[in-house]
Image (cartoon, grey):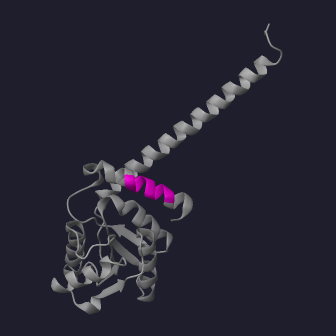
Amino acid sequence: MSWLPGSNTVMRALLSLGRGIATVFTSALLLLGLTAAMVAVQSGRDEARPVGAAVVFGEGDGSALTPAQKAQCDHATNLYRRGTVSRIILTGAVVAPLARQHLIEQGVPSQALLVEEESASLVEGIRAAAVMARAQGVSSVVIVVEPSAMLIALKVARDEGLTAYGSPAGGASGFDDPGAVVTETWRYLRYIFVGK
């Protein structure tokens, strides 16, 4: 017999609450782990194929391209030279003009370049690229971004109605940079749940 009236009911309620909290916590950990694995796997997949355009997004605020941004531009140039794409869409408020100049110096004709200079985030940039692609009659694209950002870039492009494939620049993958995987996991989940 219980020493306090109703203590069994309280104990059952506390146990039930504890199980609920444990279930939510376990589910959250599983979601984070699965998303991180998806980010890492997608970062190493090169799906390049003949499509209408390559999309190169750059984040930054410097006066010169970073080595990673140059690698992305060079990768897009190679896709153009091989005939995989006939246009290159550059997005990013600060980086797009710098990338345009770099591509022209690499021999890509200016008429093959579409430049968007308003976006400040990857999501904004991919959305703007989708608008530009549709205006050019392009429905399928190859996304060229940092390897760890590939999953979110593809998701946004597909949500915007494009058929999108990933082609990361360089040989690095998410498995090489766990910190970037963590960052991009959070960014991907924020996009899924908040849309930004």
Q: Quadrant of the N terminus?
A: top right
Q: For residue 170, what is the image quadrant?
A: bottom left
Q: Position of residue 35 (x, y in %)?
A: 43, 50
Decide which of 121, 55 is in the foreground and name it: 121
Decide which of 142, 195 is in the foreground and name it: 195
* Residue lying furthest left: 106
Query: Is residue 51 something that shows in the picture?
Result: no
- Magenta highlight range: 183-190
State left or right for residue 28 relative to residue 185: right
State left or right for residue 102 relative to residue 54: left
Q: Residue at x 44, y 58 (%)?
A: 187
Q: Position of residue 120 (x, y in %)?
A: 41, 73
* Residue lying furthest right: 5
Q: For residue 84, what is the image quadrant?
A: bottom left
Decide which of 24, 79 is in the foreground and name it: 24
State left or right for residue 32 relative to residue 102: right
Q: Residue at x 44, y 71 (%)?
A: 157
Q: Is residue 27 above or below residue 133?
A: above
Q: Residue at x 42, y 87 (%)?
A: 137
Q: Position of residue 179 (x, y in %)?
A: 32, 50
